[in-house]
Image (cartoon, rainbow, N blue to C red):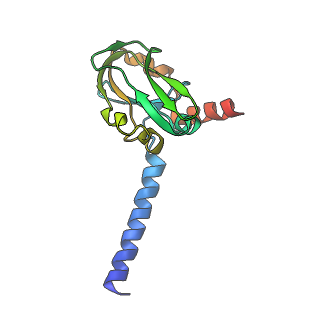
Amino acid sequence: MSLFTRRFVQNFITSQFTRQLSVTHRHFGLLFTDDHEWVKVDNGVALIGISQHAADALGDIVYVELPETGEEVSKGDDIGVIESVKSVGNIISPVSGEITEINEELADDAAVVNRYPFEEGWLVKIVMSDESELEELMDEEKYAEFCAEEAG
């Protein structure tokens, strides 16, 4: 086997393993709401987006309206709007706190939410005021069961 062929095979195997690993573990640590938002918490800051299930149900997302930074929100508040070719939906805050950052990239390319809802398609960051609210959210397994029941 030539050096080129060996490197190609090694790179292919490595890339396949990395891709499989990232797909398998990409939702690690996420919590979900019954409104189909996801939350990932890091040091009291909640990163929030919509689930793949929601992105698929909405279809092609064409517009995302997000709140202003500095706004205080309560769990259950409408904090934005997502518009697709099929429908318009509200973004519901899964936690209470202060909005410290919004994903400004979505103004130029709202469809990134469809392509990467768990990565570049995040919506807002909220410094949480009550971390106990997280106890009411679902882990990935319970969320999958919830989606199956909702579809069934």
Tell me what residue is drawn at x 45 percent, y 45 percent: 115
* Image: 108 above or below 96: below
Task: Please tell me which residue lies in front, 26 or 103.
Answer: 103
Quadrant of the rendering where the N terminus is positioned: bottom left
Q: Position of residue 125 (x, y in %)?
A: 33, 27
Looking at the image, residue 53 sits to the left or right of residue 148; the answer is: left
Q: Can you name the residue that lies furthest to the bottom here?
A: 1
Looking at the image, residue 102 sits to the left or right of residue 136; the answer is: left
Q: Position of residue 82 (x, y in %)?
A: 47, 28
Determine which quarter of the picture holds residue 141. Answer: top right
Looking at the image, residue 82 sits to the left or right of residue 87; the answer is: left
Residue 39 showing in the rendered view:
no
* Image: 34 above or below 86: above
Q: Count numbered badges in the picture.
A: 0
Tell me what residue is drawn at x 37 percent, y 35 percent: 106
Q: Position of residue 38 (x, y in %)?
A: 46, 31
* Image: 107 above or below 90: below
Tell me what residue is drawn at x 54 percent, y 34 percent: 54
Quadrant of the rendering where the C terminus is positioned: top right
Residue 120 showing in the rendered view:
yes
Task: Please tell me which residue lies in front, 22 or 91.
Answer: 91
Q: Position of residue 78 (x, y in %)?
A: 45, 16
Determine which quarter of the picture holds residue 71. Answer: top left
